[in-house]
Amino acid sequence: MGLFDRIKRVVGANLNDLVNKAEDPEKMLEQAVLEMQEDLVQLRQGVAQAIAAQKRTEKQYNDTQNEINKWQRNAQLALQKGDENLARQALERKKTYTDTGTQLKASLDQQSTQVETLKRNLIQLESKLSEAKTKKEMLKTRITTAKAQEQLEGMVRGMNSSSAMSAFERMEEKVLMQEARAQSVAELAGSDLESQFARLESGSDVDDELAALKAQMLPPASPQSQPQLLPQQETNAPKSNEVVDAELDSLRKQLDQM
């Protein structure tokens, strides 16, 4: 393959690719319908001209027939008057018009056939144009629907990787982390409170055990001191009970107010 052939093929391929990319289906449909309308206008003009020519030929043919009939009558009149020479001239003039009429008749028949053909083509083109207009509207609707579908799909694909969706995902992750931290704080607070009560309970047990140990380590009380301590204990017991009762009442009131 020669260099020029290769260049020609490359240029042709590139041009075809450019044409294919430049073709807008909607615009091409409009252009096709416009061209069909222009062809229809031209065909109507052609049919009108053909019909006008047919009518002119038909008038000429009718005029020729009238002349033929007139010279036929003139020939008969001349023979009736005994003028054979004049009758011969009239017949010669009739023959001239007869020959012209024959030609006009052939031309008229040909024109009539052409006019009928043009009329059929005109009807077919009008039908195709009407069909093309209907199909054009349908195709335009399909093109619009396809473009909208393609645009929506592009938006969906773009949303999957867009910064807006990424921002939503980041905010969702932050909310989840904040909820997890709040839950952890609540669990830690609850465990801390439980540990405080546990220390209180363990502390009271230790205090009780320490008091019991102290009691065991004290020397036994003498009999002489017991009568002296009993009155004091009896006198102090009511006072301690009153203090405890007062504290208990105060604690109850505080609990009622909570």
Image (tube, rainbow, N blue to C red):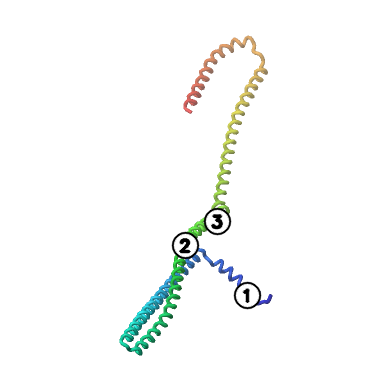
- Which residue in the protein does label 3 denote? 154
Please determine whether, in this image, residue 164 is positioned above or below residue 229. below
Q: Quadrant of residue 123?
A: bottom left
- Among numbered discs 3 and 1, the one appearing first in the sequence: 1
Please determine whether, in this image, residue 86 is positioned above or below residue 57. below
- Which residue in the protein does label 1 denote? 8
Is disc 2 surrounded by few (<14), some (14 to 19) or many (20+) residues within 10 Å? few
Q: Amino acid at mark 3?
A: Gly
Q: Between tags 3 and 1, which lies in front?
A: 1
- Among numbered discs 1 and 2, the one appearing first in the sequence: 1
Q: CA distance from mark 3 to mark 1?
A: 38 Å
Q: Which element type, helix, strand or loop, lies under badge 2? A: helix
Is disc 1 surrounded by few (<14), some (14 to 19) or many (20+) residues within 10 Å? few
Is disc 3 surrounded by few (<14), some (14 to 19) or many (20+) residues within 10 Å? few
Q: CA distance from mark 3 to mark 2?
A: 34 Å
Residue 190, visible in the rendered structure: yes
Circle number at residue 77: none
Residue 163, visible in the rendered structure: no
Which residue appears farthest toward the right when viewing the image? Answer: 1
- Which residue in the protein does label 2 denote? 131
Q: Amino acid at mark 1?
A: Lys
Q: Position of residue 137 (x, y in %)?
A: 46, 60
